[in-house]
Image (spheres, helix red, strand yellow):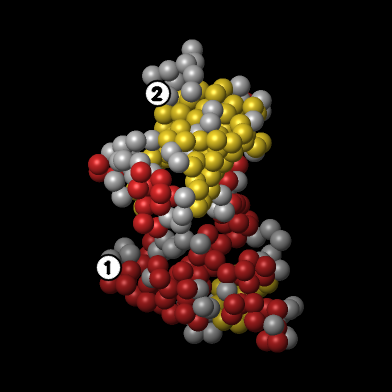
Amino acid sequence: MSFAGVSLISDGKAIGHAIDVSTASGYHLLVVNGYSHIKATTPNGKGIFSLPFMVGGHRWRIKYYPNGDCLMRANSVSIYVFLDENVTEALKVWFEVSFVDELEMQDPTYIRRREPINFSSSTLVWGQMDFMETDTLENCFTIRCDLAIATTTDLLIKVPPSSLQQHISDLLSSKEGTDVTFKVGSEVFVAHRCILVAQSAIFKAELFGPMKEGKMASVIQIEDMEPKVFRSLLSFIYTDSLPKMEIDMVEEEGKAQEALWLQHLLAAADRYDLRRLKALC
C-alpha cells in the first residue's frame, strides 16, 4: 500500500499533509490528538472530516465521529470512508479501518478477503458505525484507512478454493509414496509417516523418536484394535474430519452400532492423542 498522507485531528479540525497516490491502493492516517477534549466539545452526531486525499485517481475523505453518528451509538466512535466526488460508474473498493498497530488487518490479502464494496454517486459513503467504544480509547491514537480499488484484472481473477485437504486424502486412497505398513488383525494398511506424525505426537514418538527402533523397515503390529476402527482413524488423520461409519455397522442395529463404533473410535483417538477426533466423537 502506498502512503496517502496524514490528517491530524485537533480542536475539531484536520491539519496535515495529503499525498496523491496514482496507484490503485493506498492508505491515509488519521491521528487523533487530545481525544478527551475533542469528545467533550463535539456533540453526538457531529463528524470531523480528514483532509482530502487521492487514491487510484479518485478523491477520498475519512469522517470521524468522536461520540458516534447517532444517539444509538453515543458510546462509540463511528468511522466512515467518503468518496469525495461524483463518478459516472460505480467503483468496487476494498477498504479496512484499523488502529495503526493492528498490522494483520493492513495486509493486502486480509483486506481483500471479502467482496469489494460499491461506491457510486448514489452511495458515496461506507464505514463502521461502532468502530470502538469511547471509554476504551486513549487520549491519543492513530487510525489507518486502507483503500484498494478493484481493477478489471482483480474482478476477473477468481481464486479457487483450497484443495489441499482433498489432495492429502487422495494420498491415502492411492497409496502413492507410502513408507510405513501396519497390520491390524488380519488386515494390512499402508500410510505416510510424515502425515501421521504431523497429526499425532504418539505416532511421532513411535516412528521418529526413541521408540522407532525395529519399526523403520518392519510391519508394525497394532494390538487391541479392530481393522475398521484403525481404518477410520487413518481416514481422520488424512482428512481432519469425522469418517463415515462402514455400511455393515449400521444396517441391522442402527444407533446402538453407531454408539459402539464411536466408543471404539474415541478410545483409538485417546490412544494416539488426537484431540480433535476425541471432541468430534
Would you identify the image quadrant in which residue 57 lies?
Answer: top right
- Decide which of 159, 61 is in the foreground and name it: 61
Return the disc, 1 or 2, that comes first in the chain's sequence: 2
Task: Indicate the position of residue 267 as horizontal and vertical percent values.
Answer: 43, 80
- Decide which of 110, 11 is in the foreground and name it: 11
Task: Indicate the position of residue 109 as horizontal and vertical percent values.
Answer: 59, 43
Residue farthest toward the top in the current orientation of the protein: 88
| Residue 14 higher or lower than 247, as above or below | above
- Residue name at image x 67 percent, y 67 percent: 194
Residue 110 visible within the image? no
Tell me the SS state at disc 2.
loop
- Residue name at image x 51 percent, y 51 percent: 141
| Residue 115 higher or lower than 58, as above or below | below
Q: Amino acid at mark 1?
A: Lys
**Where residue 57 is drawn, which disc sits there?**
none
Task: Indicate the position of residue 18 as horizontal and vertical percent values.
Answer: 61, 31
Residue farthest toward the left in the current orientation of the protein: 71
- Residue name at image x 54 percent, y 66 percent: 237
**Where residue 255 is drawn, which disc sits there?**
1
Tell me the SS state at disc 1.
helix
Read off the residue under disc 2: 123
Instruction: State which quarter of the image contains the N terminus.
Output: top right
| Residue 107 higher or lower than 95, as above or below | below
